[in-house]
Image: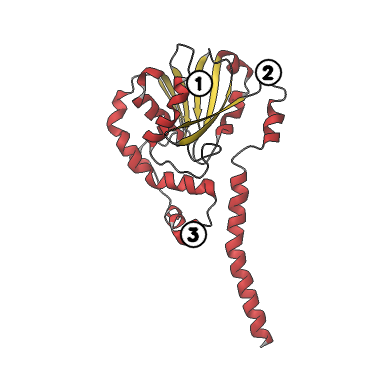
Amino acid sequence: MLKIFKWRRTWIISILLLIITPIVAFKIMEAGFEITPQEMTDYFKEKPEQPSFTSYTTLGHQMFYAATGSDTNQLVLFVHGAPGSWDAYMKYLGDSVLMHRAQLVSVDRPGYGKSGMGQSVTSIEAQAAMMKPILDSNKSGKPAILVGHSLGGPVIARLAMDYPDQVGALIFLAPAIDPDNEKIYAISYPANWKIFRWMVPTVWKVTNDEKLSHVEELQKMVPLWPNIRIPCTYMYGK
């Protein structure tokens, strides 16, 4: 009887470890996707300017962005990938040369950071519409330059498609913009099942929601690409 009890206890502990370990690992990974207030303070301590932070509500969704540089300079808007947050571009916002020549704005995309964390917005068109108020705030008299990495790439493209008069150039950094070459990894499907979804950290749920709908969203944009007639820089490594 004692041997059976020990065997059952070992089995139960093993199962619990199998469940808890990936959750803890995901939580640790999730914490690494947004900088701590102290890390931000330390980074900007020696910089000529501290970032300002702005929150606004549009289309029923809370949005957040950080900015440096004068709002009368040409607007450069940075849009991060998935997962991510505004601080993915923190070194650009802290660059003394850039901040004296442009207004540098880095936004938390919908569902990430302080832009309604966990509230997935899978529509690329809707994400672009939620960032339009940033374009509207441009006081420079020059159309904005947009920089997008990974899933931020199609978002800046959609901004240019939908609001062409407000966008002057696009910079794509390893963008996920081609529906024919967009991969959905096998783990994405079970991660969306209710039996496993509760185990997935919030930021990864948002990322997975976007991933599963991404090809369909990119296909909607295919007929709109010819409308983009501004300078585009495309950077991609092997």
Say above or below: 143 vs 23.
Answer: above
Q: Nearer the viewer, residue 173 or 112?
A: 112
Q: Secondary structure at mark 3?
A: helix
Q: Is residue 197 left or right of residue 25?
A: left
- The spot of residue 140 in percent (x, y) is 49, 12
Residue holding disc 1: 76
The local crowd at label 1, few if under 14, some if 14 to 19, many if 20 or more residues have their Cα within 10 Å, is many
Quarter of the rendering containing residue 123 = top left
- The spot of residue 61 in percent (x, y) is 46, 36
Residue holding disc 2: 48
- The spot of residue 129 in percent (x, y) is 40, 30
* Contact (Cβ within 8 Å) of mark 1 with mark 3: no
Q: Distance from label 2 to label 1 (Cα)?
A: 18 Å
Q: Distance from label 2 to label 3 (Cα)?
A: 47 Å
Mark 1 and mark 3 lie on one chain; the one further toward the N terminus is 1
Say above or below: 81 vs 91.
Answer: below
Q: Amino acid at mark 3?
A: Phe
